[in-house]
Image (cartoon, helix red, strand yellow):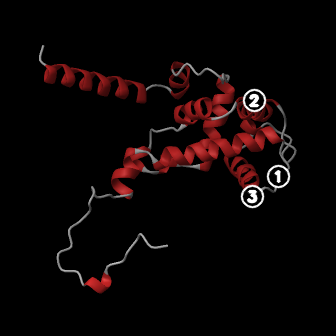
């Protein structure tokens, strides 16, 4: 087999497996990641997904309607955070799925959409005196959800249009318009 044919086969295989993975149920996709440090129940995964969608409603973008940040968030939490932070994350997810919230006397999952949004907004502003685990989990989900949006193909191609280096050639520019970017 020639090298080009082998590389082409590997490339097509990786595209196919990526497509299959992206079409999977998000909970199954998280389970397939085989996370080492963090194991959440389906209720807790549903909670993290709901918080992520409230923080960053990417479903409102037509091209990202079927996307979820859940596998990305969970993979990054497992890979990039220390054991103490992960323990706080699990503690926060457990608290929100089992304990009643002081504001509403209900669990987070039992709230309607407007109440969920109001609770997340109060966490974001710092009004809510939430346990340390809940606030840590919120901050981690927020950070990783935003990172997911910033790295989606849609945003990189359609919103943040970029040009390859060295950039566009401008042949007729006055010398006085040029700036030295190396000076402090």
The residue beneath circle 1 is: 128
Q: Nearer the viewer, mark 2 or mark 3?
A: 2
Q: Which mark is residue 4?
A: none
Mark 1 crowdedness (10 Å alpha carbons): few <14, some 14-19, many ≥20: some
Between marks 3 and 1, how big is the CA–CA gap? 8 Å
Give residue 11's position: percent from left, percent from top.
25, 26
The residue beneath circle 2 is: 87
Question: Is 88 in front, or is 171?
Answer: 171
Question: What is the count of numbered marks?
Answer: 3
Mark 3 crowdedness (10 Å alpha carbons): few <14, some 14-19, many ≥20: few
- Which of the 4 quarters of the picture holds residue 41? top right
User: Seen from this angle, which residue lies furthest left?
Assistant: 2
The residue beneath circle 3 is: 125
Which of the two labelled residues, at mark 2 and mark 3, occupies the earlier sequence position? 2
Residue at disc 2, secondary structure = helix
User: Seen from this angle, which residue lies furthest top?
Assistant: 1
């Amino acid at each position: 087999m020639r090298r080009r044919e082998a590389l082409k086969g590997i490339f097509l295989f990786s595209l196919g497996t990526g497509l299959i993975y992206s079409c999977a149920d998000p909970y199954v996709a998280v389970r397939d990641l085989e996370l080492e440090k963090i194991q959440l129940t389906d209720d807790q995964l549903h909670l993290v997904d709901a918080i992520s969608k409230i923080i960053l409603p990417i479903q409102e973008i037509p091209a990202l309607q079927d996307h979820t940040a859940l596998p990305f968030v969970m993979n990054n939490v497992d890979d990039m955070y220390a054991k103490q932070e992960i323990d706080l994350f699990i503690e926060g997810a457990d608290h929100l799925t089992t304990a009643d919230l002081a504001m509403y006397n209900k669990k987070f999952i039992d709230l309607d959409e407007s109440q969920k949004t109001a609770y997340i907004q109060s966490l974001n502003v710092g009004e809510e005196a939430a346990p340390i685990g809940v606030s840590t989990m919120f901050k981690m989900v927020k950070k990783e959800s935003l990172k997911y949006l910033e790295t989606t193909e849609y945003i990189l191609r359609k919103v943040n249009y970029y040009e390859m280096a060295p950039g566009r050639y401008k042949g007729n520019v006055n010398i006085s318009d040029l700036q030295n970017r190396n000076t402090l």
